């Protein structure tokens, strides 16, 4: 973050300007003169002007925390303009990403700064509001001053105003502010960074369904940016179907400034995201007991395939691993010319294929190997892993400040794995599961478990009480179990305790979720997002496979993202730090060649999942 504009050094000001600086400028000027005359004899003393030069130097070098401390030292010096230096200290703390220290510095500023240093004070106050994600307050602070005419202050003003408008869901005003800011930017690197920031914020606004329609007679540059928002969202979420949209935008806006900067990189990313090998093999159970699961994954895979332009599509051959062994299917696929293999699906089949892949066609297995088995090079693993979700929930619980609570999980291996993953992750974050209770799968009455784990006591004629050291309840299980547990928690007057779960407790039918109001859980965008791109993808799958089962929606999404992962893995552009925004979550590759998902959180309200 660039530092807010700074005054020239007082000793370098001339004439009446220097006189108006008063005694501080005189002392600085004398110190500078003495230092210059004696520079060949002794080391100059540490004067205020030297400290100010040092603060400026720190800021220019990007050492913002050092600059903030230097300005704080200046503010404490005798004869200092305390308000000026504290405001600059606050600005530098913000640039360093330390909002608490910035607030502390700003609180030391006197009320007189509103009249003495109105622009500087307003910019710092507005930037502090942005640090709190309060766009309304940021814009209100800016509205108290006239638009600055000094270049550094002006570009800062318009940047804060643009970000504040995005936060308040006014993207048209935001784009206007960013375009206005460009008039004050002379550094090409700053200009490119500003356009990249605008592009990213427009993409996010489009993904959240913000209104991106300009008024009549709007600046054509503004209109072009607004029309680029949905294209940017599609390039990010579904590049397979974005080529036509991008080409159409370029035809409409051949001279738009976005063509010279952000879209050059986007075009390169698009080419990489659609560069498939000539032939891809898909190993799935197409018959037998697992046929419905295999068919759902296949249908999602093919739906993604159909999103792409014909020239970019690979030749896809499907092998039924229920009719032949997975190892045999893999070997046959390689012999048939496959240069990339997706599948198989079950843990047993994945374990059977893993030893065969050294030096052969890369594999994206649709399950994880056991932790004790080391994967071969180019053997990637992708799974909808419930333990990963349980760990995400633990991190969310801790982030919400609820470190200690209780858990209710089903009997059996699945419940044990999920409960253990949740408890272990929470413990690493400083929390704990105070008590855990297990239930049998067919159970309908959870009253005794709830009374036990929450230590609920009822006395006739008096309100029920429950333990006060449990800040949450974590439940795991099917949607049916959640629909039983949540109402019974409320019946026992424990409805004030927040309830968290994994996505297994949620199903997409709105009528099925009235009884789980308040439940907080993570899930993939396919299930809970209403952004236009994800909606378009879901509609495409429905059109391609109208007889599909909504209960298998996660498997369709799983197949869709499996297809999208192929070029990212082939080109090795997917890493821990470079994510692929898929419909099953934000996808990253860990050190063990496993695809890890970052999910969105939602809370059920009136039967509908609302993003948190």
Image (tube, helix red, strand yellow):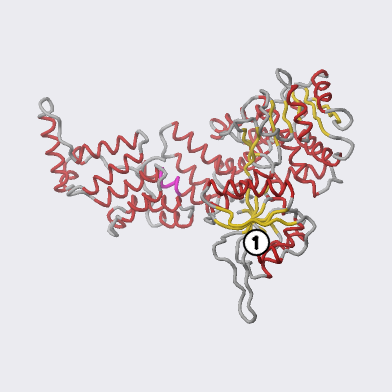
- The residue located at (32%, 36%) in the rendering is 58
Residue 609 can be seen in this image: no
Which quadrant holds residue 487?
A: bottom right
Residue 493 can be seen in this image: yes
Total labels: the figure holds: 1
Q: Is residue 329 above or below residue 291?
A: above
What predominant SS class does the magenta segment belong to? helix
Q: Is residue 363 within the magenta segment?
A: no
174 left or right, relative to 80:
right
Magenta residue span: 155-160
- The residue located at (49%, 42%) in the rendering is 179
Q: Which residue is mark 1?
A: 518
Closer-to-camera residue (75/472): 472
Closer-to-camera residue (391/93): 391
Residue 378: x and y in percent read 68, 24
Q: Residues within 10 Å of mark 1 (few under 14, many from 20)?
A: many
- The extreme bottom residue here reads 461
- The residue located at (73%, 57%) in the rendering is 439
- The residue located at (61%, 47%) in the rendering is 392
336 left or right, relative to 505:
right
Residue 48: x and y in percent read 20, 41
Residue 401: x and y in percent read 52, 55
């Amino acid at each position: 973050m660039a530092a807010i504009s700074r005054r020239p050094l007082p000793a370098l000001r001339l004439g009446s300007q220097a006189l108006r600086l008063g005694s501080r400028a005189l002392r600085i000027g004398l110190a500078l003169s003495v230092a210059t005359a004696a520079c060949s004899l002794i080391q100059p003393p540490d004067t205020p002007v030297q400290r100010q030069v040092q603060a400026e130097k720190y800021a220019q070098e990007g050492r913002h925390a050092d600059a903030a401390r230097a300005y704080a030292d200046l503010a404490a010096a005798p004869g200092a303009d305390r308000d000026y230096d504290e405001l600059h200290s606050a600005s530098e703390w913000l640039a360093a990403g330390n909002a608490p220290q910035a607030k502390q510095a700003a609180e030391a500023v006197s009320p007189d700064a509103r009249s003495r240093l109105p622009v500087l004070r307003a910019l710092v106050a507005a930037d502090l509001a942005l640090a709190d994600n309060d766009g309304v307050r940021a814009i209100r602070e800016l509205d108290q001053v006239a638009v600055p005419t000094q270049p550094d202050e002006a570009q800062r003003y318009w940047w804060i105003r643009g970000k504040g408008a995005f936060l308040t869901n006014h993207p048209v005003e935001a784009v206007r502010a960013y375009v206005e800011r460009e008039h004050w930017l002379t550094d090409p690197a700053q200009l490119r960074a500003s356009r990249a920031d605008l592009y990213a914020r427009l993409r996010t606004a489009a993904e959240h369904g913000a209104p991106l329609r300009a008024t009549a007679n709007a600046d054509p540059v503004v209109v072009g940016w607004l029309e680029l928002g949905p294209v940017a969202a599609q390039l990010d979420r579904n590049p397979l179907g974005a080529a036509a949209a991008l080409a159409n935008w370029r035809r409409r806006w051949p001279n738009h400034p976005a063509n010279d900067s952000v879209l050059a990189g986007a075009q390169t990313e698009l080419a990489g995201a659609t560069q498939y090998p000539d032939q891809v093999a898909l190993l799935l159970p197409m018959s037998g007991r697992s046929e419905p699961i295999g068919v759902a994954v296949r249908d999602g895979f093919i739906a993604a395939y159909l999103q792409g332009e014909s020239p970019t599509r690979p030749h896809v051959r499907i092998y039924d691993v229920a009719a032949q062994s997975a190892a045999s299917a893999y070997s046959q696929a390689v012999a048939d010319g496959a240069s990339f293999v997706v599948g198989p699906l079950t843990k047993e089949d994945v374990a059977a294929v893993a030893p065969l892949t050294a030096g052969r066609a890369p594999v994206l297995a649709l399950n994880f190997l056991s932790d004790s088995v080391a994967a071969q090079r180019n053997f990637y693993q992708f799974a909808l892993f419930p333990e990963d979700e349980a760990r995400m929930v633990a991190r969310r619980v801790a982030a919400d400040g609820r470190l200690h609570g209780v858990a209710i999980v089903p009997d059996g291996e699945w419940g044990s794995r999920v409960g253990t993953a949740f408890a272990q992750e929470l413990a690493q974050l400083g929390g704990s599961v105070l008590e855990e209770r297990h239930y049998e799968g067919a159970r309908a009455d959870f009253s005794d478990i709830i009374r036990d784990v929450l230590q609920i006591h009822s006395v006739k004629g008096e309100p029920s009480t429950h333990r006060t050291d449990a800040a949450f309840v974590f439940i795991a299980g099917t949607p049916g179990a959640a629909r039983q547990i949540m109402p019974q928690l409320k019946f026992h007057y424990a409805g004030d305790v927040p309830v968290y779960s994994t996505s297994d407790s949620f199903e997409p039918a709105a009528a099925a979720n009235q009884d789980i109001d308040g439940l907080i859980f993570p899930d993939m965008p396919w299930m809970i997002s209403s952004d236009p791109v994800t909606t378009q993808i879901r509609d495409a799958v429905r059109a391609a496979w109208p007889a599909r089962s909504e209960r298998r929606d996660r498997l369709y999404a799983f197949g869709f993202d499996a297809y999208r992962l192929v070029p990212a893995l082939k080109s090795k552009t997917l890493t821990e730090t470079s994510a692929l925004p898929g419909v099953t979550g934000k996808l990253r590759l860990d050190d063990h060649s496993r695809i890890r998902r970052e999910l969105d959180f939602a809370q059920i309200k009136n039967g509908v999942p609302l993003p948190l």
